[in-house]
Every structure is written in structure tokens, then in C-alpha cells.
Amino acid sequence: MGTRPADTLQGRGLTRRRLIGGTGSILGAAALGAFDIPTAAALPREADLIEPGAQIAALVIGTGYGGSVTALRLAQAGVDVHMVEMGMAWDTPGTDGKIFANTASPDYRSFWLRTRTKQPVIQFLGYPLDKDVPKYTGILDAEEMGGIIVYQGRGVGGGSLVNGGMAVTPDRSRFPGVLPSVDADEMYDVYYPRANSTLGAATIDPAWFETTDCYQYARVGRKHAQRSGFSFRFVPSVYDWDYMKQEAAGTVPKSALAAEILYGNNYGKKSLQKTYLAQARATGRVDISPLHKVTSVTPATGGYSVTMDQLDTTGTVVTTKTVLAARVFFAAGSVGTSKLLVRLKATGALPGLSSEIGNSWGENGNVMCGRANHLWDPTGALQSSMPTAGIDNWAAGGAFAEVAPLPTGIETWASFYLSITNNPNRARFTYNTSTGQVELNWQTAWKQPSIDMAKTIFDKINATEGTVYRSDLFGAYKIWGDHLTYHPLGGAVLNKATDNYGRLQGHSGLYVMDGALIPGNATVNPFVTITALAERNIEKIITEDF
Ligand code: FAE
């Protein structure tokens, strides 16, 4: 389907200057300025950090979903745990009194060791949106892996710090295609409910949804979906709905209604810091070392010798530490875990690892697009940054589209979507001996099936509504955001690179606990499945291995 460039906001009486001036959020249009960087305050207290030569019962690499489940359940079983996290603690306010930067005004806190932002939406009405920022161990990593940019959270809480909070359990009928070796009854009877309850997932109050200004964009999304015959479903969120209602009433500081999302959320979102990690710390058995990046794990007498770099906030290595861990849990995320394991196998540090290590990586079929609506279909100047609904055309067209916000602070007459599609393409991580780097062979053209599947929804909606795609968000006259993923999955797949519970083959006492276990696609947003799978696996590991 073609796009009519004239059918943009400009054709509707809005000037570029007015739009850019009023645009924030994921568009990130902010004034350049000097940044105060409170480095000392942001650094962890030395006394709390892991010590060189320490002997650790259970060392967890990474503090995202897989790592947090692992730490909590081990600690509750009486095991002392040390979590090692390459990102910051995110527990100290910056010079503006807030811990996290607003998405509208990225600053030193926003990106992981970049000197220029790399925002998912590249431009708006022809204006590029990226800006210079000081190099800092910021919260969002836009990791360039060949043909794809993989967005990931960095810090204590991992992806929960930066994500949209959509807590989606896949339809039961799709689960065997996601994790064929896992007993689905157990997952849906025990582990999904356990994960959802500990994460604090809840669905929006339907009556409030119908009346609040901040979800007008989702109501428009529903109307368009239903008029084209698609199934529209509410999805739970880990945002505190009561808090959002108070934001709307103006009685508390705003967070979701102030467009906070990509660079952290200062108030209402129940990130892992407030759920699993809070419970884990409360046991008194879990310590966390932020700004520590694991570089090696190799067998040693009594377990594994684990080497890590301690970083300062410019990313410079200030010291290197080696500890002895009886057991090591890889929970560095799909990319982090895969990169470590591929390197450790190739360099002979962990020679017994399976030849399946590095295989079956996918991007959950992510593709973004926008649609330009008619003037009589406004999506609202106030948009909650927390999505709460999706359009389900998985069975017929292979796409589940999140009705996403475009919270610019002004009316844009635009609808925005992140689609999760059944893209069959899978990539592989390999070690390049000449550069010493781990590479991923994903190619941008491999997104074409995702685009085709997303079009099964949006071509039809455009035809019904007489509307067109936006072509000003991802490059000049470019409709599809096919350069990125928010949902990396795979690289150390369950029952292939590991046994059916995440135990790495060839080296006892080593485990994978994160999104690397899921072979490339979860059919919906993945963190609930990552959490539930970790709950299942750690229960078995505690029973049989400790
Ligand atoms: P993850 O949460 O990425 O945690 C891994 C941790 O390990 C990170 O904190 C890393 O900094 C750390 N790490 C990596 N390497 C090392 C190392 N060598 N040494 C020490 N630490 C290391 O992994 N999913 C949903 O279900 N719903 C959503 O609404 C949603 N929205 C998203 C929006 C954005 C912008 C992004 C980026 C992601 C979104 N996701 C969403 C994806 C979700 O956050 C992601 O699947 C999970 O965070 C992955 O969990 P893992 O435990 O695998």
C-alpha cells in the first residue's frame, strides 16, 4: 500500500515548528544544554560491593527478570546470593531531584555509554530527533548488533527499568509453539499465576478506561480494530493503576502521565526494584554489586572462578576482581548471556558447553508503525505512557499489535503500534577470533515477514478507515520501524543448549535463567514468560541441586 506524504500533519494546518516545540516523549525533542553529572553520589558504596577473592554460594549475573526470580527463590531457600550487575543501582536522585530522566528530555542518565542518543523513533516531520549527551553508564542500551539495534535496560532491575510494563501471558493454545518441552498445564496452573502475582500485574479498571482522557488513543485504537473485525484485548500492566488515577486527578507527581517510560519511571511503575528485588533484599541473604560487569567464568576447585570489571560512570574499568562461586546463574539477558557463553566456549574457558550455544536467536518479530488518522479522530494530547491493550490477529495473520502511546503532549492525530509477529527468521551468535568480539548474523531484510504480518492488520484498518501509514517516523518516507527490537530472545535455548530446566550442559553448577532460554519468539511481550519460566526452573533446581 502506498503512502501519501501530503497526508501528514502538515497537510492539516500544523507547522513543524509548533510540533517540534510541543513534542516530547519517545520523540525526545529537547533543548540541548549543559548537564550536571553527580558522579560521586551515583556510585555504589564500596563497603557493599563484592570483594576480590570472596567465596560465593550462588552468583547471579544480571538483575533483570530471570536474575531477580533466581535470587529471591534461592534466598528464601536459605542460600546466600550475590548479584552482579553491569549497570547502575538507580537509587540516587540526579541534580533535578529525580532518579530517572524524562523521555522528553534525554540527558546523561538516558543512554548506556553513548555520546549521542539513539532513539527508537528517528525523526518527526523530517526533523532528526537525536541529540548529543555526555557519555555515562545510562539506563537504556541501544546495542548495535549488525543488522539490528537491540534495546535493553541497564541497571539494577534490568529491562523492568525501561519497559512499557505490559504483562502479557500468551494464549494457552500458542504455548507449545513457544516452549515445546515445557508442561503447559504446570505453567498455566502454577508458574504464570505465581509470576503475575509477584510482579503485581493487573488490568485497567474498565470504567475508568472508558472515560479518562489519557487512554483516548487506546479507545481510538479499539474502535479502528473492531471496525475492521479484529479482536481487541486489554492486557495487564505492572503500573499501579490507583497511582495513575491520582495522577489524572492531579493529586500526586506525574509519571505515566508525564510521558516517563524509556529512561525510567519515577513513580507508579512496579519495576523489579519494587517487587522481586525488594523481597529478595528483605531476606537479608541477597547482596548486589552494581557497575560490575562479568567477563569470565571458568572451572576452579570448589566451583567457578568468576572475573568481573568494576566500572565508573564513564565506563572506565577501575578495577578487576576475581571471586570463587560454587554455582553461577547466567541472567544477563538474551544478548548478554549469549555473548558471554559464546565467548567462553570459543576461548576454551568453558569448553564443555553445548554446540547449541549461540543458536536460535530471534527478535520476537518486533516491528513498529504509525497511522495518520482523520481530523475527526483525535488520539488526545494527554497519553498515558503505559500501553494497556492490543489487537490480536495472531491466528489469522501472525501479528499481535500493542496499541502504543505517542505521548507528545500535543494532538498528533496519529495512532502508533508495536507489533509482535511470527517472524520465522533466527540468527546465530558467533565468536570472531580476529576481533575478539561476539557477532550476530541478523539481517535487516529478515524483518520482511514481520512487515507482511503487521500489514494483515494495518492495511485492512487503513482500507476501512480511509487512512494511511505515517512515513515520517523512521526515516524519510519510511513506514516501518524494522531496524530494532525491544524483545531479544534465545541464544541459549531450553532443552537444547541447556537441559529442560536451564542447567548448562558440560559443566555442572552453571545455569541459564533469562530470555536466552526462549527460542526467538514468545507470541506476545515476553517478560511474564521469562519470569514464569525462571520460577519453574529455579523450583526444580532448588529441589534437586541444593
Ligand atoms: P534483562 O531484563 O535484560 O536483564 C539482564 C541484566 O543483565 C541487565 O540489567 C544487564 O545490564 C545485565 N548484564 C548484561 N550483561 C552483564 C554482564 N556481563 N555482567 C553483569 N551484568 C550484565 O534480561 N517486555 C514486556 O513483556 N512488556 C513490555 O511492555 C516491554 N516493553 C519494553 C520496552 C523497552 C523499551 C524495552 C527495551 C524492553 C521491553 N520489554 C517488554 C522487554 C523486556 O524488558 C525484556 O524481555 C526483559 O527485560 C528480559 O529479561 P531478562 O531477565 O532476560
Image (cartoon, helix red, strand yellow):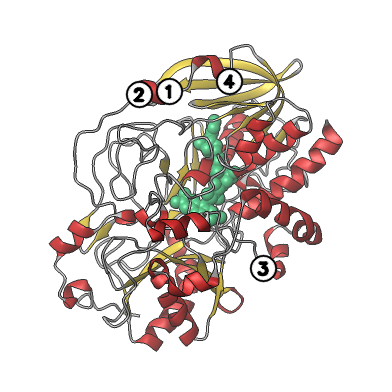
State the image coordinates of residue 329 (x, y, percent, origin top left). 67, 33
Which of the two discs, 3 and 2, labels the residue nearer the N terminus? 2
State the image coordinates of residue 27 (x, y, percent, origin top left). 29, 56
- Which of discs 3 and 1 lies nearer the camera? The answer is 1
The local secondary structure at tag 1 comes to loop
Q: Which residue is mark 2?
A: 39
Distance from the alpha carbon under mark 3 to that under mark 1: 43 Å
- Which of discs 4 and 1 lies nearer the camera? The answer is 1
Q: Is residue 393 above or below residue 503?
A: below
Please name the amino acid that badge 2 sits on.
Thr
Labels 3 & 4 near each other (Cβ < 8 A): no
Of residue 369 and residue 382, the one placed in the foreground of this image is 382
- Number of residues whose C-alpha sits closer than 10 Å to that of mark 2, classed few (under 14), some (14–19) or many (20 or more): few
Of residue 519 and residue 419, the one placed in the foreground of this image is 419
Q: Which residue is mark 1?
A: 43
- Number of residues whose C-alpha sits closer than 10 Å to that of mark 3, classed few (under 14), some (14–19) or many (20 or more): few
